[in-house]
Structures are given as C-alpha cells and as structure tokens.
Image (cartoon, rainbow, N blue to C red):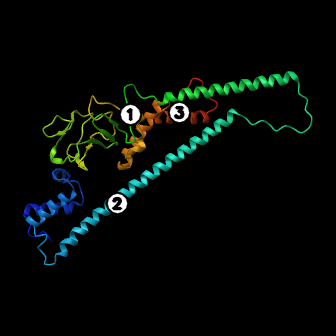
Amino acid sequence: FLFLSLPNSCSNVLDDHTAMGENDKFDGFFMTVAQQHVGIDALLDSFFGFLGRKTDFFTHHQDPEIAEKAALRILRKHSQIARQKKTLQQEAQKEREEEKKKQQEAAKKKKEEEDKKFVEPEPEPKLGIVEIDEEEEKQTAKENRKDKETIEEKTEEQKEEKPHEEVMAEGKQAPNSGNGGATDKYVWTQTLGELDVHIPLPEGTRAKNLNVDIQKKKLVVGLRGEDPIISGELFASVNYDDSMWSVVDQRMLQITLEKNNKMEWWHCVILGDQEIDTQKVQPENSKLSDLDLETRGTVEKMMFDSQQKARGLPTSDEQKKQDMLQKFMAAHPEMDFSNAK
C-alpha cells in the first residue's frame, strides 16, 4: 500500500518479488549498484533517496512513522535470517570440531595400546628361594638385549618415516590456515565455493583510485594511471556476476571470486604464480556446511579417497569391496579363498 503512486513497471517488479518470495533474482543488479558505492551508508542513502524521489514511500501517509516501521520490519526480518544462518554454521563447525576431537582421542588410545604391546610387564617374583641356572640367566639376558634392540630399531624407523609425510610436492608451498597461499603481491584463501584475495594498498586509497576488472578467466587489478598489480589468467573460471571487491580501511583491497566448479581446490590464483600443495589442504577449513547434503557427501568422499590414495590405503569403494569379500569368506569357510584378492 506504500507504493500506490509508483510507475507501472516498478510496481510490477515489486509485485513479482512479493509473489515469488525471497530470491536472488536481482543480485546481479544490486551487486553492480553496491560496487559503485564506498560503504554501506552511501548505498542505503542512495536507495532511500530513490524512494523519496520516485515513490510516495515517505508521503503517502501523514504519519511518518509508518514508513519507518515498514523499513524496520524488513530490516529485522533479514537480520533474523542472517543470525539463524550464522548459528547453523557455528553449530556445524562445532560438530566437526567435536568429531575431530573424538578421532584424535581414538587415535591416541590406539597408539597407547600398541605401545603397550612392545613392553610386556614383568611377572611379579614368587616368594621363596628360586634356583637360577647360570646358562639360563645368560640366555635370558641375551633375549632381553635383542628385544631392546628391536624396539629401538622400530622407533628409529618411525622417526625416519614421520618427516617424509610432511614433505611438500616439489616447487610448491604448504597451504596456509585458510587453504590458500601467498605471493609477494597478495595473500589468498579459499573454500570449495569461493576464493578471497587480499592485496595491500597505499594508505588513503579509495575505490575510485582503483581499476579492478574481473572476467570469467582473467583478473586485472591496479591503481589508475599505473602498471597493474595483478594481470593474468585465473587458475579456473569464475562467476564474475557474483564476484565482488571492496577497499578495507583505505589500505587493503579484498576480492571475492565465486568459483564455477565448487568441487575443486585451486593450486594458485593466477597461472604462473606460486602454487600450493593441494594434498595438504584441510577439508575441515572449508565451508562444507554451506553445501546441500548430496553434494557435501560427494565432496567428503572425494577428500577421503584422495587422502587414502596419498597414504597408500584403499579408497572407500575398495574398502567396501574388501569388507564384502571378508563377510562372504566368513559365511563359507568350506571354500578355498587362497587365490582371492
């Protein structure tokens, strides 16, 4: 009822939006408008200025509080949706952390049990006088020394193998805590769905001083009138309509790139720049909670199989086949499975 004097075309847009419910139909348009403003205050000022110039939002009713109440009602609605989404993400993160903690405790307990197997407790001596044969005593001492040497050899082997597991792929760097990397010009992080690039700028830099061009497979960034800071082909294609950039504290440029392939870890941002070893990426640092259940299951299976292959262990499908074979063998002990693999 607040838009009775709106132009017909604008009224139709509002009616369609109301009938369809919340959607991202206008995200591309609003993203373009947002990129032309510096800060949320300027964006809101332009929007309410539009309502004042082109609609009767502020003047249709004599009571000015009606317009304020309408704006507050929509504001509170979306504020509640955002808080609920954040709560769900935090709960999912907490569940992942608890699951990780359980796995670590189970691994620790298993290791303690294995360590106990190396050193068996000596039986308590029986009371009374026990005769010890001299040859038997020498033999026992010899066996004890042999067992001790065996344990020391295994310990040394474990120490030698451990550093080998941490070796990075040749020419690549270990991913940072955000599953990204760093070059001399920028630092970047990533999730399965998007990638953030952070570029330091001279103090006092504003959006109007920058030239940022995000294309499907190319990124160009620089100060106007100067050579580009970044200019090259992206590692993979992006959805440039949903990608965005902003200046933080007039000294840092943050670019968020929306990946087209949301089941791939990027090795680098720009082809030719320093790459990371994606085998060392930690899946718990990605926002798996943002994916639907089917896609999330596929991603988790993909990450598990990748880690198993890197360790020389069977994938989930191979393990399933082995389990089925073991069950069949147990159910048919009369059959010969000596040649089964």
Could you tell whether 277 is left or right of 329 in the image?
left
The residue carrying pointer 1 sits among few (fewer than 14), some (14 to 19) or many (20 or more) residues within 10 Å by Cα, namely many
Between the C-alphas of marks 2 and 1, the distance is 33 Å
**Secondary element at tag 1:** helix
From the image, state whether disc 3 or disc 2 is nearer to you: 2
* Residue occupied by mark 3: 322
Residue at the limit of the structure toward the front, as seen here: 203
> Residue 48's quadrant in the figure?
bottom left
Q: Answer left or right for 21 relative to 115.
A: left
User: Residue at the bottom extreme?
Assistant: 62
Assess disc 2: are there few (<14), some (14-19) or many (≥20) residues with their C-alpha within 10 Å of its C-alpha: few
Residue picked out by circle 1: 278
Which of 321/119 is in front? Answer: 119
N-terminal-most mark, 1 or 3: 1
**Mark 2 lies on residue:** 83
The residues tagged by marks 1 and 3 sit, at their Cα atoms, a distance apart of: 28 Å
Q: Is residue 328 above or below residue 91?
A: above
- Sequence-earlier tag: 2 or 1: 2
The furthest residue to the top: 135
Camera sees residue 265: no
Q: Is residue 65 above or below residue 32?
A: below
Where the N terminus falls, by quadrant?
A: bottom left
- Kindly identify the amino acid type of the residue bearing the numbered disc 2: Arg
Task: Specify the amino acid type for callout 3.
Answer: Gln
Residue 182's spot in the image, x, y percent?
Answer: 33, 36
Alpha carbon distance from label 3 to label 2: 46 Å
Q: Residue at x 37, y 42 (%)?
A: 178
Q: Amino acid at mark 1?
A: Thr
Which of the two residues, 317 or 283, is positioned nearer the viewer here?
Answer: 283
